[in-house]
Amino acid sequence: MPTAPSDPKAAALAKAQAASSLQNIFLTLLSNVAIATSLALLFYFREGNTLIFWGLGAAIAFAVLRAGWVSRLKSSGRIAQDPQPVLRSLTVMALASGLLWSVVPLALPLFSHAQNVNDVVFIMAGTTTGAIIQSLAYSPMAIAFSAPVMAATILRMLLSGSDVGYIVAADVVFLTVMLFRAALLGERNFTTSQNTAFEATALAASLADANQALERLVRMDSLTGLANRSHFRSVAGAACAAGTGVAFLLFDVDNFKTINDTRGHDAGDRVLQTLAALLCSACGADDLPVRLGGDEFIVVLQGANADRRAVALGERLMSALLRPVLIAGQPLTVSCSIGIAAHAAGAIDLDQLSARADAALYRAKEDGRACMRVFDAQMQSALTLQRRLDFELAAALARRELHVEFQPQVAMATQEIIGFEALLRWNHACAGLIPPPDIVSAAIRLRLSAQLTEFVGERICAFLRALDRKKAPQIRVSINVSPREFPIHSPAQTLKTVSERYGVDPKRIEIEVTEEAMFDPKRCADELKLIDQYGFALAIDDFGVGHSSIANLMAVEIDTIKIDRSFIHGIAGNRRDQQLVAAITAVALPLGHRIIAEGVESEADAECLRMLGCSYGQGWLYGKPMKEDEAIGWLVQRRAAAIEPLPRSA
């Protein structure tokens, strides 16, 4: 039974020594037979004695025996399994061969003749030298053969009784020492070279392992074990170029920031890991699940039916998430918004397909989250428009193709004008009127938010200066900014610079931000602080459509709350919306906040709002958005004519 080597390096060395020894042994045996034959013929022709042929026969027979044994040893595989016993066996066989050869100079009387003694010294020393040269990998085997031969030769020299014999014996002793030393040095050199080779091999293997680990690190997300963005681009790029069908399933976790804020980042990480595990179990063998970063994931599907498989995968994932996940033993409901984009045949640009998946995901979020949307022709039109805006916005802004319109805000009881909201407009030559959110989103993508804010701020200040020249009442004008702009630039700093340039009191400018700024006041704290520090008023726009609670009203210093138009239209007949507005006014009014209802279009809705405690309104019932000159003329005319109530705008 093979014994397990305690030292792998020693076992590898023994294996190399055994392999080298077996590789050279056939040549050694052949030389032994050749030398034995030469020796027999030499003494036969010189002495006419046939006794030497017995020694020749024994040498040949033993050589054949050894050759057969070596052949079986090689075919048995024992060298790889357990090389140490092989080396011991080779040494024993070499010793036996050496003992056989030692009989020749001692047992045969013909070697007592002086001339024959000299011949036997030459032949025995040559045989020993050849054996050592052929066994440099493993010295014990060479020494086991040589020691009996050289000892017998030395003894024969000493038995000659002549001075020459003694001198030759001394020379043979010296030669023996030198040969044994050469054997030991040869084994040492072989060992050194093998160790160097082992170390080089180990280093190469270590480097290969390191390269594989580095490659896995480069390709793998460390938190979830999924592929990362870099590997996604490599695989997805090849799939898009192959033209055999590809689909992207893009999704992220709904309200993931809330999970981090309320449960902690460790819980957030566990949610991502749980989601990654669910994704892996839902994916097919050929699908590539990827964590792009944060809470955003994507799956690459390839093949002719990739579109159908992507939809089925999305359904499986949403079905799995119907069950709460356990985080630290506590159930947590998790949902995802999913966007799918597929390309059936032909090559497609990776970024183009990614943009389609992103557009589908955005639509899923717009439709209330926790749902799945597949990219379609309508989304393609929106995406085409987005790309056109991205391409043309900078030039349009430089050419002043954009303009600002102003919509009045009134006290609904007296219809007194209390202010205007500045509304950005872009009447595109081909696409028509571009919605303001699309313009703002394009500016954020293009890092043009500061220029856009400066442009709108200049039009507001020019409008206020014109009103002052007309001796109009001191009113406030509001401007919309998105909290998404805050990491790019400071709207407050930009508007401060513009207002100082025009000599306009910052108190006459109100900055409207969506309620996500109130929902995440820490992220927006610095900008909100600057708004207050510079003297601008602050309004929360579209209140009620996001994820804020009324308690958030106390987290930020605000002046105005603007209730989203989705809760205002038809409020006279909608009890749920009435309850919401009543709750907002009940909390906001004691805090000193002004409440403006957006989208007031009927007297019935206006009357209902007044009864619920909302004093101010904005909508087509009181005035449509007007260009700067129109708004100034309209306001001056109203003041001069003292028209009451306001005429409805068409």
Image: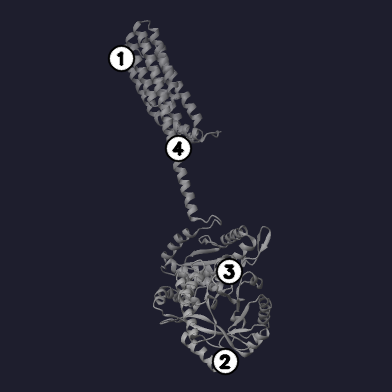
- Relative vertical location of residue 353 with respect to residue 571 in this rendering, above or below: above
Q: Which residue is mark 3?
A: 315
Tag on residue 605? none
Assign a secondary structure to mark 1. Answer: helix
Q: Which residue, as the protein is rendered here, is positioned at the far left?
A: 45
Q: Nearer the viewer, mark 1 or mark 3?
A: 3
Q: Earlier in the sequence, mark 1 or mark 3?
A: 1
Q: Position of residue 592 (x, y in %)?
A: 65, 76
Q: Which residue is mark 2?
A: 646
Q: Which residue is mark 4?
A: 199
Q: Nearer the viewer, mark 2 or mark 3?
A: 2
Assign a secondary structure to mark 2. Answer: loop
How far is disc 2 from disc 3 in space, using C-alphas?
Answer: 54 Å
Assign a secondary structure to mark 3. Answer: helix
Name which residue lies at 60% across and 76% down: 559
Assign a secondary structure to mark 4. Answer: helix
Q: Identify which amino acid the numbered label 4 is placed on.
A: Glu
How far is disc 4 from disc 3 in space, using C-alphas?
Answer: 54 Å
**Circle 1: is it few (<14), some (14-19), or many (20+) Cα within 10 Å?**
few
Q: Which residue is mark 1?
A: 45
How far is disc 1 from disc 2 in space, using C-alphas?
Answer: 146 Å
Q: Identify which amino acid the numbered label 1 is placed on.
A: Phe
Q: Position of residue 294 (x, y in %)?
A: 54, 62
